[in-house]
């Protein structure tokens, strides 16, 4: 490799690495806040997340769809984590026991996805994901997560029952900064708006609080823990939840592959091979997330935006960056430093990034003319799905856990409704 080629590959690898890091850093902090984790536990979760993100992205690039698409923590899993945290407490389970059940749920979801991909079932399930279904899913996802993000911004996670004014003001400022950079920024500034916003917010937080992040007494080198939450616990309620999630995630796979194909100027027709292989490896990656007690990953459609902005279409730098993130996870002092990002800042950055998802939901829902049939289906799914989100957790307490964990999640209820109604109430042609 000549010097010019080496410099180009190095720069592209660094760019991909920053993108992988920026897309992975916030969710472990948010999940840690929901489950009341201390600093060491959040640092451990972040270490495992970095490792699994790097490994999952690398596996997809060599065995799955074989495209430069980042595997990152999935929005739907934030919803599952947050809802099961509430229902678990209501059912008498501790946060620790709920996390053990979540390990099982991720592993079972992975098994379903692997079966869908290896036996080529995914290509027969895909037709159910009409624009109406995907649009409804995206909209309900943003509605459900907005409450979680807003609580984090206001400092209401953990032991706080009232708004923390200083934290709320700084978080609101960062929300506006990330939003402004993503809309009005150019080039690198626009692409890394969330990362830049987190750094700015972190600095402001240090200045206001007068405390710099401390790494503490940690090992210089360590491997990610296996089953850090404990041995997975089984509950029959995990099976239907895992099955529904596995089906919903197929639409995410297709959207990512199509988006990256288009931005790279390719036209691979039906893309069945890429989708089947990608689904199978996503299944493997989900199971790995359960084993390493992390947050399950999916192919991120934002990879297409990164490729379009930077013009980086080569796969090699992406693979090097994935390996680099895995190696990065082996050094706890670095991970601990990043883990000290304040939770309100991470929540604010994520809240701003999800505004794009609202636009995507509206575009999908209005993709076809909104006739009486479509508006009725949307109305039923929205009213029941969102209505379920506002029901107190106590109302499901007397139901079997199998029904409780499904019915208490408005995202799963609403998305399942729109899928079923679309299949039963067929459009006249």
Image (spheres, rainbow, N blue to C red):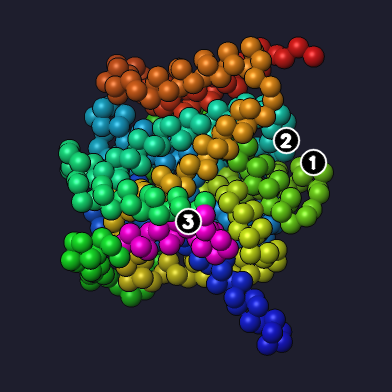
Q: Position of residue 367 (x, y in %)?
A: 67, 29
Secondary structure at badge 2 equals helix
For mark 1, what is the residue? 270
Separation (CA) of disc 1 from disc 3: 36 Å
Residue 134 at least partly seen: no
Quadrant housing the N terminus? bottom right
Quadrant housing the C terminus? top right
Query: What secondary structure is the stretch in magenta mostly built from?
Result: helix
The answer to whether the residues at label 1 and label 3 have Cβ atoms under 8 Å apart is no
Separation (CA) of disc 3 from disc 2: 38 Å
Judge whether 354 appears above or below 207 on screen.
Answer: above
Q: Position of residue 253 (x, y in %)?
A: 63, 43
In the image as oriented, which residue stretches furthest toward the bottom? 3
Q: Earlier in the sequence, mark 3 or mark 2?
A: 2
Judge whether 88 appears above or below 186 on screen.
Answer: above
Q: Nearer the viewer, residue 260 or 186?
A: 186
State yes or no: residue 193 in magenta. yes
Q: Which mark is residue 123?
A: 2
Residue plotted at (51% across, 36% down): 358
- The residue carrying pointer 1 sits among few (fewer than 14), some (14 to 19) or many (20 or more) residues within 10 Å by Cα, namely few
């Amino acid at each position: 490799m000549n010097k010019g080629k080496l410099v180009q590959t190095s720069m592209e690898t660094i760019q991909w690495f920053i993108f992988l890091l920026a897309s992975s850093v916030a969710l472990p902090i948010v999940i840690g806040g929901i489950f009341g984790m201390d600093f060491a536990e959040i640092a451990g979760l972040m270490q495992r997340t970095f490792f699994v993100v790097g490994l999952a992205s690398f596996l997809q690039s060599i065995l799955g769809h074989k495209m430069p698409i980042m595997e990152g923590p999935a929005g739907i899993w934030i919803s599952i984590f947050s809802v099961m945290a509430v229902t678990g407490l209501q059912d008498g389970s501790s946060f620790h026991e709920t996390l053990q059940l979540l390990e099982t749920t991720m592993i079972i979801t992975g098994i379903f996805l692997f079966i869908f991909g290896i036996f080529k079932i995914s290509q027969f399930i895909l037709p159910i994901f009409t624009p109406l279904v995907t649009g409804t899913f995206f909209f309900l996802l943003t509605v459900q997560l907005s409450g979680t993000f807003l609580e984090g911004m206001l400092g209401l996670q953990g032991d706080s029952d009232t708004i923390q004014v200083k934290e709320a003001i700084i978080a609101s400022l960062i929300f506006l900064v990330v939003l402004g950079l993503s809309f009005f920024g150019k080039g690198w500034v626009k692409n890394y708006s969330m990362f830049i916003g987190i750094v700015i917010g972190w600095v402001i937080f240090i200045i206001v609080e007068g405390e710099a992040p401390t790494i503490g007494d940690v090992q210089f080198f360590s491997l990610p823990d296996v089953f850090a939450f404990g041995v997975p616990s089984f509950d029959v309620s995990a099976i239907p939840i895992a099955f529904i999630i596995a089906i919903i995630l197929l639409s995410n796979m297709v959207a990512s592959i199509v988006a990256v194909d288009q931005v790279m100027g390719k036209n691979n027709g039906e893309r069945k091979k890429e989708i089947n292989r990608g689904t199978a490896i996503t299944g493997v990656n989900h199971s790995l997330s359960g084993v390493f007690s992390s947050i399950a990953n999916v192919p991120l459609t934002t990879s297409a935006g990164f490729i379009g902005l930077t013009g980086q279409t080569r796969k090699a730098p992406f693979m090097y960056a994935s390996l680099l993130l895995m190696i990065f996870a082996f050094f706890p002092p670095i991970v601990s430093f990043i883990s000290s990002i304040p939770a309100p800042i991470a929540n604010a950055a994520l809240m701003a990034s999800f505004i794009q998802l609202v636009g995507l939901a509206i575009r999908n829902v209005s993709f076809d003319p909104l006739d009486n049939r479509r508006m009725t289906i949307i109305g039923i799914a929205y009213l029941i799905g969102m209505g379920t989100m506002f029901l107190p957790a106590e109302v499901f307490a007397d139901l079997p856990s199998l029904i409780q964990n499904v019915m208490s999640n408005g995202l799963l209820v609403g998305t399942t409704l729109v899928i079923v109604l679309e299949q039963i109430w067929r459009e006249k042609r």
